[in-house]
């Protein structure tokens, strides 16, 4: 009971939608995000709803028809993202049914006019909400 109530309550708070990438083109699991490796975090813009849905699915070519540019250590960043972070994985921490990565950010940027795609109450949402 508490778990369901907690998830529903936390779900009322809108959150940005991100895609985490690494230089390993075959990477599909956390095991490829080793301590010391570079990762990219693309914060999706509200025009990237279809991209968010594609990256959430299994068994599809997530990068098909996706424009990227490469930064530190060949890490791909998604073009059109509202913000980006690039950094080196420092540690892994277990948190419930998640693994939380601590990352030392070495590069960041944002698009001034971009609106961020949101996730709220179990759904992806574009502005206005």
Image: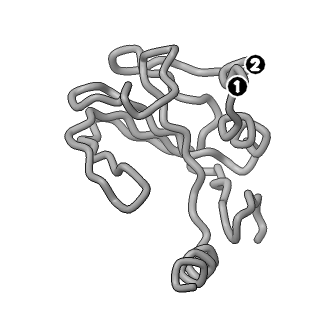
What residue would you read off at disc 2? 65
Where is residue 95 drawn, in percent x and y?
34, 60
Residue 14 placement, left or right of 27 = right
Looking at the rendering, which quadrant does residue 14 occupy? bottom right
| Vertical placement of residue 63 versus 87, above or below | above
Badge 2 element: loop
Of labels 1 and 2, earlier in sequence is: 1
Q: Is residue 69 left or right of residue 124?
A: left
Q: Position of residue 123 (x, y in %)?
A: 74, 61
State the CA–CA distance, disc 1 to disc 2. Answer: 16 Å
Mark 1, Cα crowd under 10 Å, few <14 / some 14-19 / many 20+, is few
Location of mark 1 (residue): 59
Q: Residues within 10 Å of mark 2 (few under 14, many from 20)?
A: few
Q: Which mark is residue 95?
A: none
The location of residue 103, given as percent across then percent down, is 28, 42
In what quadrant of the picture does the C terminus appear?
A: bottom right
User: Which residue is at 53% across, 81% downward?
Assistant: 6
For the residue pair 35 and 42, the one nearer the viewer reads as 35
Q: What residue appears at the point 36 percent right and 49 percent down from the top-left corner?
A: 99
Does 82 appear above or below 86? Answer: below
Residue at 38% over, 40% down? 108
In the picture shown, does residue 57 fall above or below 38? below
């Amino acid at each position: 009971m508490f778990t369901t109530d907690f998830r529903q309550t936390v779900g009322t708070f809108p959150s940005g939608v991100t895609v985490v990438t690494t230089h390993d083109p075959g990477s599909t699991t956390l095991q490829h995000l080793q301590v010391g490796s570079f990762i990219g975090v693309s914060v999706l813009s509200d025009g990237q709803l279809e991209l968010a849905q594609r990256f959430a699915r299994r068994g599809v070519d997530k990068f098909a028809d996706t424009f990227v540019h490469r930064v530190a250590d060949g890490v791909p960043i998604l073009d059109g993202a509202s913000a980006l972070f690039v950094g080196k994985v420092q540690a892994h921490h277990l948190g419930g049914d998640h693994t939380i990565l601590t990352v030392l950010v070495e590069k960041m940027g944002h698009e001034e006019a971009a609106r961020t795609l949101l996730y709220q109450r179990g759904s992806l949402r574009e502005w206005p909400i």
